[in-house]
Amino acid sequence: MSILIYAESENGKLKKTSYELASYAYKIAQNTQDQVVAVAVNAQNLDSLGQYGVSKVVSVTSEELSTFNSETYSEVLTLVAQQENANLVIISQSANAKYLAPLLAVNLEAGYASNVVALPELEGGFTVKRSVFTNKAFGKAEIKTDTKIVGLSNNAYGLHENQVSCVVEDFNPSISQSGIAVQSVDKNTDKVSIADAEVVVSGGRGLKGPENWHLIEDLADVLGAATACSKPVSDMGWRSHGEHVGQTGKPVASNLYIAIGISGAIQHLAGINSSKTKVVINTDSEAPFFKAADYGIVGDAFEVVPQLIEKLKEFKASNA
């Protein structure tokens, strides 16, 4: 038997979540004595997954799969899962994976648990801990089907190196052309992606206009962070919708989330609650975000952020 992970990639490069899934699967495999297998589509540097516990990588290379298509991708993963005799499939909680999961569950007649945040309890069954109610609470769910699918929340388990010998095998399935292609056309390929970022710096209407966005970008550059924004900012056209985070935008599960000039509407907080440490900078001491934040600064972003950038640069220079 094996544990199969779907190692997602972007522009041929494996995402950070792929290594997190590998770490998570390896820990489970230590208890179940299963082999960890990864399936990757049009990705490079696949043997790097061996550093995180993957013994075998099934590599699928096809021009027909250059654009994500939930139906064809689910067909490919189903074939690999059957070929590798997988009784557990682990995927991320990316937008693509959320499209993929229900189709894969139907194909494999598998139970699916989303938003999983911890290792499963294996004694007497297979029970997982899930975040529920937009990350305001946790619940437990038991998957009773023979084949199980787990959607691991981003940054819930982390990266853990477990070097093993890894082999890469090519797989060339027959691919149908049904379904609707889902392709993101709003990408900044030279920037840190929100999904993979350890740190996210986000701005709101408190920045007063797009001409002041350099404050967000400058702070992000110092921290090696991704940039993001609130919904009103993207709606007004200050920033692209690809940077909008929150319940109706992209979810964020970074180690550090810095909100500048964002009041903290409930929809925004619901999308960033999984972040481990939240920092807010706002002139309004009554802003809702302060109740959710771990650290807060009541002050003018145009004064606070430049000083913060300078202090961070000094710190980096002294520790170089």
Image: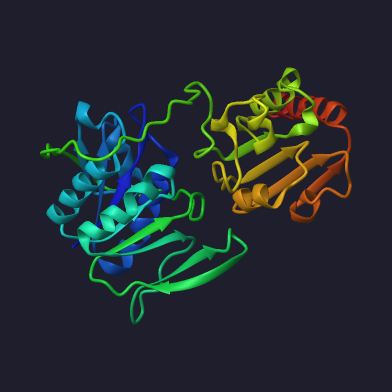
Give the residue at x 31% y 47%. 6
Q: In the figure, is residue 40 to the left or right of 197? A: left
Q: In the figure, is residue 146 to the left or right of 256? A: left
Q: In the figure, is residue 250 to the left or right of 96? A: right
Residue 2 in view, yes or no:
no
Residue situated in front as seen by the camera: 123 or 98: 98
Q: Position of residue 189 (x, y in %)?
A: 47, 23
User: Which quadrant of the figure has residue 120?
Assistant: bottom left
Which residue occupies the extreme bottom position in the image?
124
Q: Position of residue 112 (x, y in %)?
A: 35, 63
Q: Is residue 98 above or below residue 109?
A: above
- Image quadrant holding the N terminus, namely bottom left
Q: Position of residue 90 (x, y in %)?
A: 33, 55
Give the residue at x 24% y 47%. 74
Q: Position of residue 257 (x, y in %)?
A: 66, 43
Which residue occupies the extreme top position in the image?
211
Residue 24 in view, yes or no:
yes
